[in-house]
Image: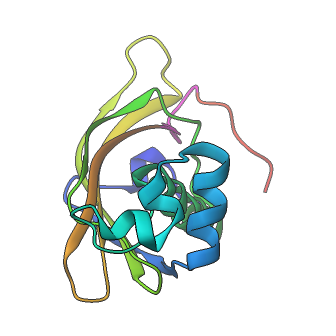
Amino acid sequence: MIFFDDIDVGTRTEHGSVTVTREEIIDFATKYDPQPFHLSDEAAAMTPFGKIAASGWNTCALTMRVLVDSWKEQQAMGLGSPGLDELRWLKPVYPGDTLHVASEVVEKKPSRSKPHIGSMWSDILVTNQHGELVLKFRSIVMMLRKTAGAPQLDA
């Protein structure tokens, strides 16, 4: 079990990867972001993308899935997030791209009002199979601490 206290500023973690499919791009776009360049090669050919490209929100959702699967595997004691900062879509994501998700802890603070919780800021970095950065954001995560006065979990 990983707690707030177990993680140091500067810790870098490779969380895993996911390969993007054309079907997934179209399904996501149909439901949530039905812009033509996410739905059709013909429409995308008339844009700077040149071919069908994933919605940035689709890329974020895929990234979140990789992160959550990694945290579950590590049994990290995450308590949710109040948000994120500095979201940037840096390069298009195309069918067949494999996205690699990594994080680096840049800051952490124990809560002043709730001694059993701490907040951690991490840069989330997503690269494609060519090592190109396609997505970057700063995540804020609340985590359970293993300090005196903190609720203890039964193992």
In the depicted structure, whether residue 44 falls above or below residue 51: above
Q: What residue is at 23 percent from the left and 88 percent from the top?
A: 130
Compared with 79, 88 (above or below) is: below
In the rendered image, residue 146, in percent from the top left (x then y), is placed at 53, 42
Residue 82 vs 87, above or below: the answer is: above
Task: Residue lying at the far right in this picture: please name it.
Answer: 154
Q: Is residue 144 magenta?
A: yes
Residue range in magenta is 142-149
Q: Is residue 10 magenta?
A: no
Q: How far across and how far down the image is residue 2, in percent?
A: 53, 58
Give residue 46's position: percent from left, percent from top: 29, 64
- In which image quadrant can residue 72 be found? bottom right
Which residue appears at 43% of the width and 70% of the height? 42
Percent across and percent down for residue 67 are 51, 62
Quarter of the figure with residue 39 = bottom right
| Magenta region, main secondary structure | loop
